Image: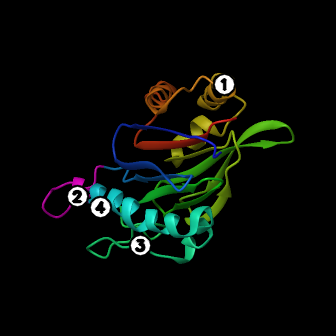
């Protein structure tokens, strides 16, 4: 039996795509988040439209889900070398994805995930992991250099894409007893997250006036 994926997001500005499904006993999760500034095109329209978001979601339900159906959880290891395109030949997955002013994302299939961020996007990918018996938040990928990698997902794993300046100020300085890092850990360790809607409310409470942009979080429920 596969571990359950719990997902949540919070958004004050920017754009986000968040999708979840199950294929042949494989739980699948996909998110692309970014475009922190209110970007406009030459005609003053938002740089990331509802159509773009819809095409990203459509790409998940067709190209990505097809790969999962064919290869199961092992497909995650071939994705870094594979490119998916939408109808306008814009990249749908990975560091070269065209998504506003920049983005980061997670594609998770059962026990593994593929994560990426664009250089200069302002978005990073972080995870909660255990180091020497103590939970820590570490930065998997930084927008300073961008890139992509695969990350294992054991029960209790937590991955997030979020604004890098917010992560540096609120999550990574663990010396503060009342910061978002401690609050985030307490929520997961208590096992209080019941469903995705509740997860959304928890994340909204963790953010404060210093948060701007969008954040998506994936947690693997402990057995």
Q: Looking at the picture, does residue 136 appear above or below residue 113?
A: above
Mark sitting on residue 186: 1
Q: Residues at badges 3 and 1 in contact (C-beta under 8 Å)?
A: no
Compute the Cα span from label 3 to label 4.
11 Å
Asked if one can make out residue 95 in the rendered structure from this viewpoint, the answer is: yes
Q: Residue at x 44, y 71 (%)?
A: 96
Q: Which residue is mark 4?
A: 55
Of residues 4 and 43, the one nearer the viewer is: 4
Mark sitting on residue 156: none
The mark nearer the N terminus, 3 or 4, is 4
Q: Which residue is mark 3?
A: 84
Compute the Cα span from label 2 to label 3.
17 Å
Say few, some or many: other residues with alpha carbon within 10 Å of mark 3 (under 14 / 14 to 19 / 20 or more). Answer: some
Q: Residue at x 67, y 50 (%)?
A: 153
Q: Residues at badges 3 and 4 in contact (C-beta under 8 Å)?
A: no
x, y percent for residue 181: 64, 32
Q: Residues at badges 4 and 2 in contact (C-beta under 8 Å)?
A: yes
Of residues 202 and 192, the one nearer the viewer is: 192
Compute the Cα span from label 1 to label 4.
36 Å
Q: Residue furthest left?
A: 43
Say few, some or many: other residues with alpha carbon within 10 Å of mark 4 (under 14 / 14 to 19 / 20 or more). Answer: some
x, y percent for residue 149: 62, 64
Range shown magenta:
38-51
The mark nearer the N terminus, 1 or 4, is 4
Asked if one can make out residue 145 in the rendered structure from this viewpoint, the answer is: no
Compute the Cα span from label 3 to label 1.
38 Å
Q: Which residue is mark 2?
A: 51
Q: Residues at badges 1 and 2 in contact (C-beta under 8 Å)?
A: no
Q: Is residue 119 magenta?
A: no
């Amino acid at each position: 039996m596969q571990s359950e994926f719990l997902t949540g997001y919070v958004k004050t500005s920017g754009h986000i795509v968040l999708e979840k499904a199950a294929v042949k006993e494989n739980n699948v999760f996909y998110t692309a988040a970014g475009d922190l500034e209110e970007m406009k095109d030459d005609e003053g329209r938002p740089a990331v439209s509802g159509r773009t978001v819809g095409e990203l979601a459509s790409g998940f339900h067709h190209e990505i889900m097809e790969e999962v159906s064919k290869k199961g959880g092992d497909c995650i290891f071939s994705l870094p070398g594979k490119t998916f395109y939408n109808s306008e030949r814009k990249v749908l997955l990975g560091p070269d994805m065209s998504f506003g002013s920049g983005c980061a994302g997670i594609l998770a299939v059962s026990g593994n995930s593929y994560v990426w961020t664009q250089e200069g996007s302002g978005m990073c990918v972080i995870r909660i992991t255990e180091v020497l018996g103590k939970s820590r938040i570490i930065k998997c990928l930084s927008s300073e250099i961008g890139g992509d990698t695969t990350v294992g997902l054991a029960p209790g794993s937590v991955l997030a894409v979020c604004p890098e300046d917010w992560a540096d100020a609120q999550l990574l300085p663990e010396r503060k007893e009342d910061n978002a890092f401690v609050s985030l850990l307490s929520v997961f360790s208590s096992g209080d997250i019941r469903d995705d809607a509740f997860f959304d409310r928890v994340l909204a409470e963790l953010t404060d006036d210093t948060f701007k942009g969008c954040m998506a979080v994936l947690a693997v429920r402990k057995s």
